[in-house]
Image: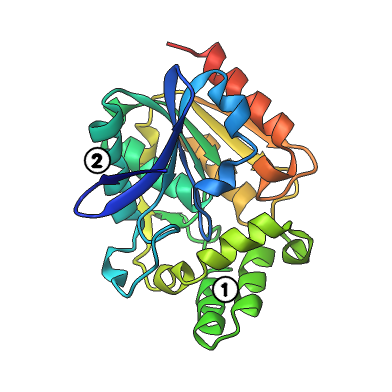
Amino acid sequence: MIATEINNYTLYYNKIGKGKPIVMVHGSLCDSRYWKKQIDAFSSFFEVYLINLRHYWPNNCNDDHEKFSIKQHSSDLITFIKKIIDRPVYLLGHSRGGAISIKTAIEEPDIVDKLILADPGGFKIEGVDKIFDDNDDFRIKSSKLIIDNKQEEGLQLFIDTVSGQNTWARMVSWFKQMVNDNAKTLIAQSKEPPLILKIEDLSKISIPTLLIGGSISPSPYPEILDKLQQIIPNNTRINIIGSSHGMNIGNPKVFNSNVCNFLIKNLH
């Protein structure tokens, strides 16, 4: 793992393979280990950057909650791409990492050549309320359980809400270890300001964009993808059959082939 200073913070990342750079941005409770089933496939074609966001493992999540936000993570990502890679990248974000990736593409469109959004979440679209408001309080409830030393219950509530009932019980040991290592980030996440995106800004994302959903992902992820499909002009939409929110783990072969085909087909 490589350490670098980004915006006065030590950021850790891995770099594997050669070719066009692809930066992979994890979501809530995760880190670079989340992409373990993508590394071999992607590094055969691309220079793969696996980033660990501010506050996530291998760092501890401290009490500096003011700097835990999608805005801060996007700022870190922009600085990382400019400082470490110094050329336009393919950008892949999952869940909350999708929100970070969208924010990055809006703020600095020249550093992103292609955008891949896998069940993006953790944001709202201005003027669109019904999609986003129903389940927001589960983050606060999960956080409170962790604060009350009921970490297992808090993690189960979060994972089962975003991926479907009984998902936590079925998860493999390496995933549970990763989630436990990042449990305290939920406390910070429950306090972060909401990211509200404007339809006007989303409609200006002109780069080729791949929208990926799990065919059995719970609400609001399918509805979010529906809305993004309507707004982002140059998009392709696919669903990973039989998979929920963690489709890159649930069906990695199909996920990997769709991402690689999209990027290679549109290579420039």
Mark 2 neighbour density, 10 Å: few (under 14) some (14–19) many (20 or more): some
- Name the residue nearer the viewer: 158 or 169: 169
Q: Which corner quadrant holds the N terminus? A: top left
Q: Is residue 6 above or below residue 171?
A: above
Task: State the residue position of label 2.
Answer: 79
The residue lying at 65 percent from left, 79 percent from top is 153
Q: Is residue 88 above or below residue 28?
A: above
Estimate the x, y position of residue 191 in percent, counting from the top left. 38, 73
The quadrant holding residue 146 is bottom right
Estimate the x, y position of residue 109 in percent, counting from the top left. 30, 30
Disc 2 marks a residue whose amino acid type is Thr
The residue lying at 48 percent from left, 60 percent from top is 129
Cα separation, mark 2 vs mark 1, equals: 32 Å
Estimate the x, y position of residue 144 in percent, counting from the top left. 51, 83
- Label 2 or label 1, whichever lies nearer to me, is 2
SS class, disc 1: helix
Q: Is residue 198 visible?
A: no
Mark 2 near mark 1, Cβ–Cβ under 8 Å? no
- Name the residue nearer the viewer: 50 or 100: 50
The residue lying at 73 percent from left, 31 percent from top is 253
Answer with left or right where residue 245 lies relative to residue 122: right
Task: State the residue position of label 1.
Answer: 138
